[in-house]
Structure formats: structure tokens, C-alpha cells
Image (cartoon, helix red, strand yellow):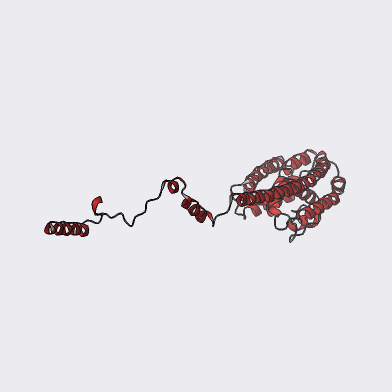
């Protein structure tokens, strides 16, 4: 009997060392030190409550997370309302600028009817002071949000481009030269460090101005000014050459510059027609040679 029991224990011990997951018969397991939970503890597992609260003790409660979310969107609402109010004020001033530019353009249209240039310009110049005041108001509004000039720039850039084109046309009628970027800022009372004139707005405005020159040339020739095509052709040729110095991208400014080529071609056709008919002045040979070289 003892030898049989000894052999059985030896076999089980060797099986335990060879098998990482040994199987022990239930009759060899003593249940004296094992206490099974009663039915009450199984039906109410209190240890799950303690484990759950220990896992969620470091996380935010649902109420706290909801408060943060609500506060964030409340801040967004305030910002959007302030931005909307600011845009409305800017658009109100931009609308007034547009009204003034319409008056200036209506005055300048008289130059195509062979009205005296001095008379036409004098009437148009009377509105420059109004534009200066409006841009001063616009500068004060934008100064309320420092560093966000280009965020609201789109609300007045179209009107500014029109203003530049009209000022450039008036300047050319007076002097026969191109108005400079700094001169436009001075006329409008703009400060480069605070509220200046965007370079793209200036260049696009100059392109708009060139669209008026072919019509002006045709009307002047009809009125008997046969030297006007030569002057305009020289101006447009120099302007076109200056624009070719810029590395323009495929955007709106590039499209407007491409349109300047057609303005130059129209003026060339009028000039050559006048030249062929023998109506041009004798001193225009230099201008004609320069235009042929550029085209």
C-alpha cells in the first residue's frame, strides 16, 4: 500500500515539472484552506464599485467636461459677434467709398467728350478730401484689432483698387506720368506702418487705369488731337515694360496684366493708322521706334 502511494506521488511530481499547466486531480486538492463566497457576496459584488471608482478617479467628471465645452463655445460666440460687428462697420465705410468713386468716375467721363481737362480734373479733385476722411475712419476701425489687417482686407480692397485707378488716371491727365505708390498713400492720408496701401491693390488699380486709355486715344483723335496716340503709346510701353520686371503668379493680378497687352495693341493700331494717313506730328519717330521694339 505504501509503495503504491509512493509511486503515485513520484509520477505526479514528475508530471508537474514537465507540464507548465499541470492538472491535479480534485481528490488531491485540499479544501480546508479555501473559503468559497456565499450566495450573498456573489449577488452583491461590492468590490466592483471600489474598482470602478479607482479607475475613474483621475478623469474629469461629465459635468466638468460639459462646463469646459460650454465655456469654449461661449468664447467663440463672443468673438464671432465682435468680428461680425466690425465687418459691418467696415462694409458701411466701404459702401461710402464706393459712392464717392462713382461720383469721381462720372466726372472723369466728361474727358472723353473733349471737355477741358482742367475743368474735369478740378471737379473730380473735390472728392479726394472726402476719400481721405473715409480712409481715416476705416483706419480707426481696423486699429481696434491690431495685427489683423489682412483678415478684413477683403472688405475694402475692391473699392481701393477703383480709387487707385481713378487717382492714377487724374494724375496722368495732369502730368502724363504714372502716380507712385507713395503718392497715392499721401493723397489718401494712409500710413504704411499703421494702415497702408496694399501693393496688389495699387498694381491692379494701375491695370484698371490702362483700360481707359484706348478709349481716350480714339476720342482725342476724333477731336483732332493727332499727337495723343504717340504720347499714350509711349506711356503704355514704359508701363508694360515695368510690369514685366515683376514675377507675377497665375492670379487676378496676372490676368489684369495680360489685359494691358490688349490695351497697348489697341493704342498701337490707332497710332499706326494716324501715322499712315500722315496726320501724326513730325516729332513722333522716336516714339514709334520704341513702340515697335517693345511690341
The location of residue 204, given as percent across then percent down, is 69, 48
Rendered position, 140 above or below 264: below
Of residue 233 and residue 53, the one placed in the foreground of this image is 53
The location of residue 197, given as percent across then percent down, is 73, 55
The mark total stands at 0
Of residue 173 and residue 166, the one placed in the foreground of this image is 166
Residue at image coords 64%, 45%: 252
The location of residue 96, given as percent across then percent down, is 81, 44
Describe residue 153's horizontal placement relative to residue 21 as left or right: right
Locate the N terminus and report the quarter of the image it occupies.
bottom left
Residue at image coords 43%, 47%: 42
Of residue 278 and residue 223, the one placed in the foreground of this image is 223
Taking the image as drawn, is residue 49 in sight? yes
The location of residue 259, given as percent across then percent down, is 65, 43
Taking the image as drawn, is residue 234 in sight? no
Residue at image coords 66%, 54%: 242
Amino acid at each position: 500500500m505504501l509503495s503504491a502511494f509512493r509511486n503515485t506521488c513520484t509520477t505526479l511530481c514528475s508530471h508537474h515539472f514537465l507540464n507548465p499547466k499541470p492538472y491535479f486531480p480534485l481528490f488531491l486538492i485540499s479544501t480546508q484552506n479555501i473559503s468559497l463566497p456565499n450566495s450573498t457576496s456573489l449577488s452583491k459584488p461590492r468590490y466592483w464599485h471600489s474598482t470602478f471608482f479607482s479607475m475613474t478617479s483621475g478623469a474629469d467628471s461629465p459635468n466638468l467636461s460639459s462646463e469646459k465645452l460650454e465655456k469654449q463655445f461661449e468664447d467663440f460666440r463672443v468673438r464671432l459677434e465682435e468680428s461680425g460687428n466690425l465687418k459691418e462697420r467696415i462694409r458701411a465705410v466701404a459702401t461710402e467709398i464706393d459712392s464717392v468713386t462713382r461720383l469721381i468716375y462720372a466726372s472723369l467721363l466728361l474727358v472723353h467728350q473733349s471737355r477741358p481737362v482742367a475743368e474735369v480734373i478740378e471737379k473730380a479733385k473735390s472728392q479726394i478730401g472726402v476719400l481721405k476722411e473715409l480712409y481715416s475712419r476705416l483706419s480707426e476701425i481696423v486699429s481696434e484689432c491690431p495685427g489683423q489687417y489682412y483678415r478684413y482686407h477683403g472688405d475694402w480692397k475692391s473699392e481701393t483698387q477703383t480709387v487707385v485707378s481713378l487717382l492714377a488716371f487724374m494724375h496722368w491727365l495732369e502730368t502724363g506720368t504714372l502716380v507712385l505708390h507713395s503718392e497715392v498713400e499721401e493723397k489718401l492720408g494712409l500710413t504704411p506702418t499703421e494702415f497702408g496701401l496694399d501693393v496688389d491693390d495699387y498694381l491692379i488699380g494701375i491695370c484698371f487705369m490702362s483700360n481707359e486709355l484706348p478709349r481716350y486715344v480714339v476720342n482725342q483723335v476724333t477731336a483732332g488731337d493727332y499727337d495723343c496716340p504717340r504720347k499714350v503709346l509711349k506711356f503704355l510701353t514704359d508701363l508694360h515694360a515695368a510690369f514685366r520686371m515683376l514675377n507675377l503668379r497665375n492670379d487676378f493680378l496676372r490676368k489684369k496684366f495680360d489685359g494691358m497687352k490688349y490695351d497697348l495693341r489697341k493704342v498701337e493700331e490707332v497710332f499706326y493708322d494716324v501715322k499712315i494717313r500722315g496726320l501724326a506730328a513730325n516729332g513722333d519717330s522716336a516714339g514709334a521706334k520704341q513702340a515697335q521694339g517693345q511690341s
